[in-house]
Image: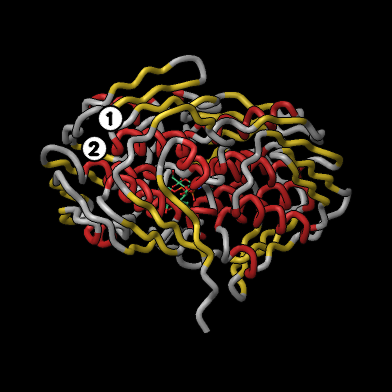
Amino acid sequence: MDKFIIQGGRSLSGMIRASGAKNAVLPAMAACLLAPGRSVLTNVPNVMDVRTMRRLLVRLGAKVDFEDNRMTVDVPEKLKCEAEYEIVKQMRASYYVLGPLLARFGRAKVSLPGGCSIGARPIDLHLKGMEALGAKIQILHGYVEAQGRQLKGARVLLAGTHGVSVGATINVMMAAALAKGITLIESAALEPEVVSTAQMLISMGADITGAGTPVMTIAGVDGLRPAETRMIPDRIEAGSLMIAAAISGGCITIEDCRPDHLGAVIEALRAMGVKVAAGDEMVTVEARRRVKPIDLTIAPYPGFPTDMQPQMMALMATATGLSVITETIFENRFMHVPELQRLGADIKIEGKSAVIKGVPESTGAPVMGSDLRASAALVIAGLKAEGKTEVNRVYHLDRGYERWERKLKKLGAKIRRVHEPMAV
Ligand code: EPZ
């Protein structure tokens, strides 16, 4: 198990590129299954979740080559239609194969993902959507078994108790692309990853309008063809780097990013007194003094993303006063709080909110990430903490951040990866 050793206190400076978006690539890889033949994806980040998805596609019968951030997915006429627990338990986004397999082959068997460290994360909306398209769904022995020889377009309302769903919107859109007739997705998620998947499907021959709005219309077509698609930049990685620069009191420029996907993050940072200059596919962040406190409520896009809540909390912990973050999307996404406290943060949890009293100094300590974004927050906090911070279990971070220690090092951070053999 690897860990990071960070020596805090260095200001970040320089230029860095954002990688392709993990959360856009995972559905894109599943979307390749909709068309027999060779699809090409470029700007694909080499992160663990992408490699896990690759293993899943290979198990289903596809041939996947992945080199230099370019992936080719060769999809045969026939595929195995089962995503096994062994893979799904490692990565929930495996559920993205449900829609494509069901739409193309009339059946799919996908393991239920089980628990998750940030909340219960049910998949009822995915299943509701497939049922609305005419699939028969059974849960047997921990697996979702879906059958539906010819899916039929329908009206599908995809709002749940926690609001819209990125995953369900994408999954139902992929299934509806090959259904007979017209599907109307109401309460669709607006995230850029939904739009990028829709654009990819359109380039494959799908008839989709309204992506990026709450109502999407999908007119089913008889077949789709493979296409070449460039992945959008990772807005969460870019945002995490912006916060890293701000906490370090530095100035960095991030290239190949989409400031238009980062509106809420830019607004929050500016309100905290951070200078942010957004250009065409680049953004410069400069923070020369302690940030000001703000109150923030997490919300689906275009609101402030839940995937940046832990990183933002790390920054707030260094602010000149009291900040409040209210998390509305996942019920258990404060697991990083006790770890930030180990670094000297003053944070209290009150229901869905965290009250963060900024402190001028923090001190390095050994800490442990509980999930991908919590780990990013701890790395960010470690950049500021005086002395040595040891972030354990960086395999969480490796799921979604491409060569992050190298990027941070390039920007001047003192950080190194240490490989630790597993204890027996
Ligand atoms: C995507 O997860 C992202 N994952 C998550 O990023 C992200 O946190 C989340 O969207 C919200 O933005 C990928 O894109 C692979 P949701 P997803 O369905 O699609 C509830 C990261 O760190 N819900 O939009 O699974 C759900 O429990 C990850 O990169 C249902 O109730 O999230 C949550 O409260 C973590 N029933 C809310 O909706 C369902 O059937 C939003 O979840 C589906 C979801």
Q: In the shown orientation, is residue 176 left or right of residue 295?
A: right
Quarter-wise, where is residue 23 in the image?
A: top right
Q: Mark 1 or 2 closer to N-term? A: 1
Quarter-wise, where is residue 277 in the image?
A: top left
Marks 1 and 2: CB-CB under 8 Å? Answer: yes
Q: Secondary structure at mark 2?
A: strand
Asked whether residue 350 appears in the rendered view, the answer is no
Query: From what the image shows, is residue 47 above or below residue 342?
Result: above
Mark 2 near ligand 1 (CB under 8 Å)?
no
Of marks 1 and 2, the one in the foreground: 1
Asked whether residue 115 appears in the rendered view, the answer is yes
- For this orientation, the residue located farthest to the bottom is 424
Mark 2 crowdedness (10 Å alpha carbons): few <14, some 14-19, many ≥20: some
Residue position for label 2:
296
The residue nearer to you, when weighing 244 against 200, is: 244
The type of residue carrying mark 2 is Leu
Query: From what the image shows, is residue 366 above or below residue 234?
Result: below
